[in-house]
Image (cartoon, rainbow, N blue to C red):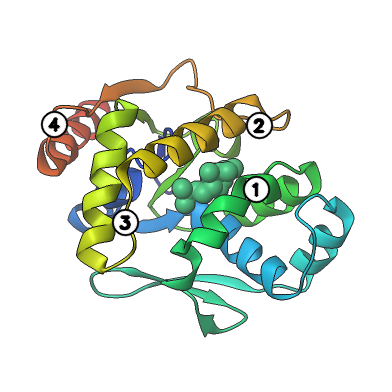
């Protein structure tokens, strides 16, 4: 029997991972954060001084890299070669370089293969940029989450403050807008809403309202 797959895509800081995690917990599905995989490789590339525009070297690095997404109680742990990098992959340097790493064809093909290996195994909620459009084109439910760039910057600002990270609203807004443009304009499986995805504008919704809306969509389909 085939597992159920829920795909959640959208621009940066739209709340995808927060919402995907909650849905996975409610439904007892496995949550897969594909952005974390690109971030983990980026962290390793920065550590080993591999240039983000050197596709072949990045690819060779990736082939020697083990990335595991472990389900912890309240959160997901990201293990890079068995080291917990869950926090480190969210840092500024990784955030600024990840889209450069993720634009390369060889990198995406290998990541997508790894991501597809999770499908069918079990019921999953997967979030990213190209899940509904490319990784799981036959996903049971596809959601495309959007929100105004102002609202997304504000959410990230509050999150950073809470974590004690540096936070500058204007800078965050710029970073988010730049990353979106880069992800939308890349050649290989860019950020795009799949034709059959349901668009959800979360600008004026709370996290729980978004979760509720998506659960209803899943129920209607099921
Ligand atoms: O979701 P998150 O912000 O952690 O993703 C970081 C970056 O990884 C994105 O800006 C994008 O460049 C890349 N990414 C991607 N495809 C995915 C998930 C993330 O290209 N499916």
Asked if residue 117 is positioned above or below residue 11 in the image, the reply reads below
Residue 209 in view of the camera: yes
Check the image and name the residue furthest to the top.
195
User: Residue 29's mark?
Assistant: 3
Which residue carries the number 1 mark? 112
Which residue carries the number 4 mark? 205
Q: Nearer the viewer, residue 25 or 174?
A: 174
3D distance between C-alphas at marks 4 and 1: 31 Å
Mark 2 near mark 1, Cβ–Cβ under 8 Å?
Answer: yes
Residue at left 66%, top 31%? 189
- Is residue 70 rendered to the left or right of residue 154? right
Q: Nearer the viewer, residue 64 or 91?
A: 91
Q: Is mark 2 within 8 Å of ligand 1?
A: yes
Q: Earlier in the sequence, mark 4 or mark 1?
A: 1
Which residue carries the number 2 mark? 189
Q: Earlier in the sequence, mark 3 or mark 4?
A: 3
Measured as percent of width and height from the top left, residue 149 is found at 34, 29
Residue at left 80%, top 49%? 53
Q: Earlier in the sequence, mark 2 or mark 1?
A: 1
């Amino acid at each position: 029997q085939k597992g159920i797959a829920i795909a959640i895509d959208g621009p940066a800081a739209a709340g995808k991972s927060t919402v995907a995690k909650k849905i996975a917990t409610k439904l007892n599905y496995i949550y897969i954060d594909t952005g974390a995989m690109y971030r983990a490789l980026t962290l390793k590339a920065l550590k080993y001084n591999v240039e983000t525009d050197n596709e072949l070297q990045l690819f060779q690095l990736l082939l020697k890299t083990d990335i595991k997404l472990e389900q912890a109680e309240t959160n997901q742990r990201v293990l890079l070669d068995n080291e917990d990098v869950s926090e480190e992959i969210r840092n500024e340097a990784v955030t600024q370089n990840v889209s450069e790493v993720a634009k390369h064809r060889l990198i995406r093909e290998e990541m997508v293969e790894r991501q597809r290996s999770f499908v069918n195994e079990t019921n999953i909620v997967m979030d990213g940029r190209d899940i509904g459009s490319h990784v799981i084109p036959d996903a049971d439910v596809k959601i495309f989450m959007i929100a105004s760039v102002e609202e997304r910057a504000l959410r990230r600002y509050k999150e950073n403050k809470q974590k004690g990270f540096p936070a500058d609203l204007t800078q965050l807004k710029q970073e988010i807008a730049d990353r979106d443009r880069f992800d939308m304009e890349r050649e290989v499986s860019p950020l795009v809403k799949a034709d059959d995805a349901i668009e959800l504008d979360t600008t004026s919704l709370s996290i729980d309202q978004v979760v509720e809306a998506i659960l209803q969509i899943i129920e209607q389909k099921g």
